Amino acid sequence: MSLELVDVRKSYREPGGALLPVLNVPHFKVNEGEQVALIGQSGGGKTTLLNVISGITRPDSGKVIVGGVNVTELPEPARDRFRAERIGIIFQTFHLLPAFTAIENVMLGMAFSGKQSRSYAEELIELVGLKSRMNHKPGQLSVGEQQRVSVARALASRPRLMLADEPTASVDLANQDNILMLLREACREKNVSLLLVTHSKDVSSQFERIEKLSEFNQIEVHA
Amino acid sequence: MNLVSIAYKSMKQRWLPSFLTCLSVALGVALMVAVLVLNNVVTTMFQQTGSGYDLVVGPQGSATQLILSTIYRIDSPIENLPWRYYQEWLEDPRVEHAIPFNLGDTTQVGDFPIVGTTPQYFLVEYADGKKFRVGTDEFGLRGTWDAVIGSEVARKNGWKKGSKFKMIHGGQDDHVHDEEFTVQGVLEPTGTPNDKTAFVHIDGFFQMSDHSQPIRDAIRFQANFFKESEEEVIERYKDSIDEILKNEADPHHHAHGPIPDIQKEVTSILLVLKGNNLQRSNRAFIIQGELREGRRSQAVNPVLVMARLVKDLVGNIRLAFLYLTGLIIVVSGIGIFVSIYNSMSDRKREIAVMRALGARRTTVFSLILLESALICLLGGLAGLLLGHAMVYFAAPIIEARSGLLIDPLAFTLVEFIVIPILVAMASLVGFLPGLTAYRSDVAEGLQS
């Protein structure tokens, strides 16, 4: 599924009342099945960009077109549904729910899309190499294992677009490559477009297409 | 994975506050169940007692006092009726059984009320379909100095067949009578005031000092009661009066043996009427009307009087208890609100993650309401179980003490509406935390 941003602008209001521009993207596109590494400095608007793409945050203006659907025009419940069905998200700090086991966290990823299947969740857990630990809670898993669960959770709703926000930032170097390989393989196998945000050159160097946020986000960066 | 299982897992995650709020709801509901069951027991006890008699006939005065003294033995008798009046009822063709009752004295040990009556008292039903049963083969009360005692009297005083006891005169001097009665039987528990009563043979009761009227007072009393001249009364009891006056003139004579009818009085008379239920009701209604016109006595339906008393008195106590338990449940509701509301700041991230995974605002709102409802539901169900378990364990003790059979599984109507009320309360207390979840900012929550 392709992704296209057209004239997307987003500002936040500062405590003093002044507007702080964060995004000003005249055009940005990811083709169907393409894998893109997006690099940028801290405070450069990377997370806001992902939130705008996923429909979590509404831009002030512009279009976010995902698979031909202008997400910005959808009312909030429809955006939620669209996100649940079409977009997978991987967070830097995993955001696994501590009360749920690994398999339950994966199933939570499909709970709001109406496509629940325990066997598929088990398949994903097996895919990330955690079959023997599927009934462990996040607190009983290592950091690397937790991120692998979050990869499985992001794939659970059978998304067409994967957004990964610094997925390897919290894991050690040994796990970094494993997780990256796992994520890229899974996306390639399922023909899922991948937009991965990172500030690590080691990570970005593994992608054929690397984009610098500062090059297409036409605002002054507040580092 | 559905919303219920997600809400349940959230509760489990915060198991201590969830458990404590559940417990507070459970205790409130258990208390309510216990109050309702006990209220039913008390109401049943009050309403069934005396339901075996169609009418209680007594002197003019308070109908409630007549029933409280005759059936419940918790009030003093109004006045006396002549024995001849009781005999008239015996001969009334509408009457199946007329049982004389004499009250006022108490046992020397334990201060239990004494009833002087005839053996017939034990042969009629004391409540609908319930007859007295004794541990021994016979009811006793055959001889003048025989007694039958209630189960509670036997238990507290340690009396059994063959035990002897004296009684305290219920008049103004409160002296102990010299005469002794012998226990011939112990009643099985009935759950009525009979359990706390000692029954003595009415002949023995009359033969005790101060229990028979002085002859001149008796003549005057009868004349007044039956609207006759004293001469007419004297003529009616001529032989007895001559004998009494002769004995009074003899300084060596000691009054022992049967008391002449003219000197006998009763405090009330229990009537069981002839016919089927409808006929009995009609006859009771007619008799009540007749006595109202005659104005020398009254006839009272014990069930109606007690139903009114229960409604006025016990009903209010029940209402007060229900208000109290309702208040406890409301306080529990506030506890649930505080618990969930306080957890909202900790759950900001959890809610944001679910929203990021595609959960709608209404979904996370429902999730919080569901959690509140689950706490109320689990607490409510635990409370119902706990309440009935309490009744289950208390039932044998209450039965042993009062004879009341309590069914621990007997549900009252109020219990069936407790759960819907709790769910409504859960929706109310979960609304504000739910709204917090509804309004939460996903991007901000993910950063927290």
Image (tube, rainbow, N blue to C red):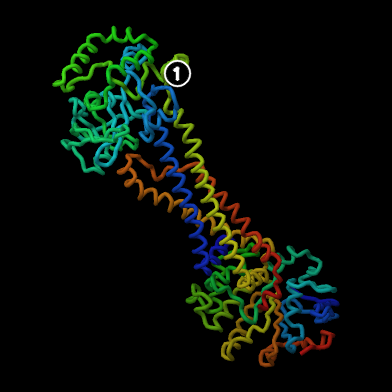
Residue in the image at 48% along x and 56% along y: B26
* Rendered position, A204 above or below B157: below
- Relative height, residue B217 to residue A4 (above, below): above
Question: Which type of secondary structure does the marked residue at label 1 adopt?
Answer: helix
Residue B1: which quarter of the image? bottom right
Which kind of residue does numbered mark 1 sit on?
Gln
Give B235 or A179, whichever is nearer the viewer: B235
| Percent coordinates x, y for residue A176 in the rendering | 60, 88
Q: In the rendered picture of this protein, how many numbered marks are placed on residues? A: 1
The subunit letter for the residue under badge 1 reads B
Which residue is disc 1 drawn over?
Answer: B288
Q: In the image, is B42 to the left or to the right of B429? A: left
In front: A18, or B265?
Answer: B265
- Residue B401 visible within the image: yes
Q: Position of residue A3 (x, y in %)?
A: 77, 75
Q: Is residue B31 left or right of residue B140?
A: right
Q: Where does residue B362 sit, x and y in percent of width and height?
A: 68, 61
Q: Is residue A105 left or right of residue A33?
A: left
From the viewer's perspective, is residue B74 above or below residue A97? above
- Front-most of residues B87 and B270: B87
Q: Residue at x 39, y 45 (%)?
A: B408
Image quadrant where residue B125 sits: top left
Instruction: Mark yes or no: residue B54 visible.
Output: no
Q: What quarter of the picture does the N terminus of chain A occupy?
A: bottom right
